[in-house]
Image (cartoon, rainbow, N blue to C red):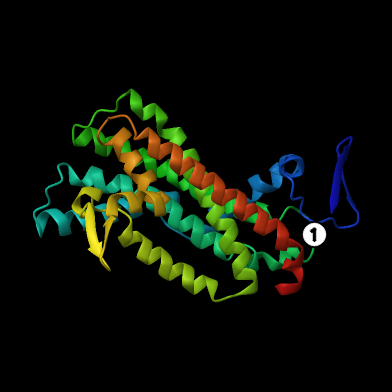
Amino acid sequence: MYVIRKEGQQTIIEVTDPVPLPQLPGHLWHYGRVRLRELWLFRELIQNLVVRDLKVRYKNSALGVLWSLLNPLLMMLVFTAVFTVMRDSPIAKYPAFVLIGLLAWQFFQDSVAGATNSIVGNSHLINKVYFPREILVISGVLANLVNFLIALLLLIPILLLFDISLTAWALLLPVMIFIQIVFTLGIGLLVATANVFYRDVGMIVSVALLAGFFLTPVFYPLSQLPENYLLFGIEWNIWRLMYYLNPMASIIENYRRILYYGDQPAFPFVFRTFITALGILVIGLMIFYRYNSRFGEEI
């Protein structure tokens, strides 16, 4: 393991004998505190990697960061044309409705896709210098978070254009963003670890994200799905399964409740989604820490 200490302006890294990942809750809590302290010491590296990701993404682009606004706007226009012009949609103010879902899904999709190749794509860094490897996943998610927050600026005039007033419930937006970050980081750590050992993971993630886009109520409300469906002689509650098995469905639905409908979120589902997201993050961290010492050998 690595012991990090500060001496004046210098950060001293000492290599000691490796120890297995603690199993007891108390040890896990202590281990987590050590890792958080280590991340704090490398906060400038996280900032630099976020800036690097943003610069690389928009390098030689005429519009630059404006693509964070134009991409979801163009997608909104496409879905509006399909579901309102070509097909009579029962959803009032559909452009605002679909834009909320698109922004949230794009943040998740870009973060997971970027995390998949975050370790393999930075092998030159991993094999040259020590730093907490999870920083590569975290910085990618934070870079996409910046794009997400910029894109949210587009949402405000769209809501005003369709006479949708923000209520006091909109103040819960940071809570929903935080839950999505927790969930996205957990998934990102899992796919990043798996991709180091099995390069097919990149293709699997691409297919899964495409399928997830259609299986998640991004451009349609959950109410358009049948509440119950008979399959193999068993009656399934589709709505409940969607919320339980797909945290993004609950996250997007609650984004809409506080922004589109101006209503309070479904607090039971918010709590369950947070617990699920936190559980996935813990599992992702444990697996990541279990195998990160082998990253240098595999890449």
Residue at position x 71%, y 63% from top? 291
Q: How many numbered marks, from 0 up?
A: 1
- Say which of 279 and 130 sits in front: 279
Q: With respect to residue 173, does 226 lie above or below?
A: below
The residue lying toward the viewer, choosing from 294 and 52, is 294
Identify the residue at image location x=34%, y=53%.
242
Q: Callout 1: few (<14), some (14-19), or many (20+) C-alpha neighbours within 10 Å? A: few
| Residue closest to the eye, 59 or 52 | 52
Q: Position of residue 129 (x, y in %)?
A: 80, 59
Q: Which residue type does callout 1 highlight?
A: Val
Q: Residue shown at 54%/76% (left/top)?
A: 200
Give the position of the N terminus as an image quadrant.
bottom right
What residue is rendered at 21% in x and 46% in y? Answer: 95
Left/right placement of residue 275 relative to residue 154 reads: right
Across and down, in percent, residue 154 comes to: 33, 41
Q: Nearer the viewer, residue 126 or 1?
A: 1
The residue that label 1 is drawn on is: 129
How far from the left and from the top, in percent, is residue 66?
Answer: 40, 49
| Label 1 residue SS | loop
Asked whether residue 55 appears in the rendered view, the answer is no
Q: Quadrant of residue 62?
A: bottom left
Q: Is residue 99 visible?
A: yes
Residue at the extreme front: 233
Q: Position of residue 92 (x, y in %)?
A: 14, 42
Instruction: Tell me if 185 is positioned left or right of 245 in this view.
Output: right
Q: Quadrant of the C terminus?
A: bottom right
